[in-house]
Image: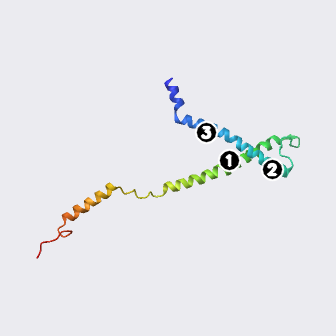
Amino acid sequence: MKGFRDFLMRGNLVELAVAVIIGTAFTAVVKAFTDMITDLIGKVGGVPDFSKTSFYGISVGAFVTAVLSFVLTAAVVYFLVVIPYNRVSARLKELEDQPKSAPAVTSEDLLTEIRDLLRQQAGSPTTGRVSDQR
């Protein structure tokens, strides 16, 4: 049972399950958009469903409808998902590649710098001391 539990709780399995669920929900969106475009083609061409079309007695309509649906679905996914995703990814990569700003100076860093300067001044006889030369 421990091995089965470990299998179920692996991160990859959970991520894959989420991807399948989101993909299934997204399929409905893409299908609806593809149907809308097919209807527009039907308004222009007169027939939105090519399933009854035949060519020299060979029924090619179902194939034509499937190919058209595939091309429209691929176009919807490419233009509405892939291109925006690539643009966002490129912007995020640019932000990651930018040099990080200098770390904020803390009061501890300032105190250390002051201490070092005071030590340096105390070590040199000419700086900061009044000499007894008369």
Q: Which residue is mark 3?
A: 19
Q: CA distance from mark 1 to mark 3?
A: 15 Å
Name the spot of residue 111 as percent of width and height, x first: 29, 57
| Mark number displayed over residue 40 | 2
Q: Is residue 47 left or right of residue 14?
A: right
Check the image and report above or below for 129 versus 24: below
| Amino acid type assigned to the residue bearing label 2 in the image | Leu
Q: Whole-percent x and y of residue 124?
A: 19, 66
Regarding mark 1 in the picture, which secondary structure is present there?
A: helix
Q: Are dots 1 and 3 in contact, CB under 8 Å?
A: no
- Vertical order, 19 against 119 (above or below): above
For marks 2 and 1 on the same chain, the one whose residue lies earlier in the sequence = 2
Residue under the point 40% across and 58% down: 102
Quick one: 62 or 127, which is closer to the camera? 127
The crowding category of the residue bearing disc 1, from other C-alpha atoms within 10 Å (few below 14, some 14 to 19, many at least 20), is some
Determine the image quadrant of residue 21: top right
Q: Position of residue 121 (x, y in %)?
A: 22, 65
**Marks 2, 1: nearer the viewer:** 2
* Residue closest to the far bottom: 134
Q: Is residue 91 visible from the viewing direction of this image?
A: yes
Residue in the foreground of this view, choosing between 69 and 64 = 69
**Which residue is identified by label 1?**
77
Tell me the CA gap for discs 2 and 1.
Answer: 18 Å
Label 3 with label 2: CB-CB less than 8 Å: no
Please, what secondary structure does the residue beneath circle 3 have? helix
Q: What is the three-letter code of the residue carrying label 1?
A: Val
Of label 3 and label 2, which has the lower sequence position? 3
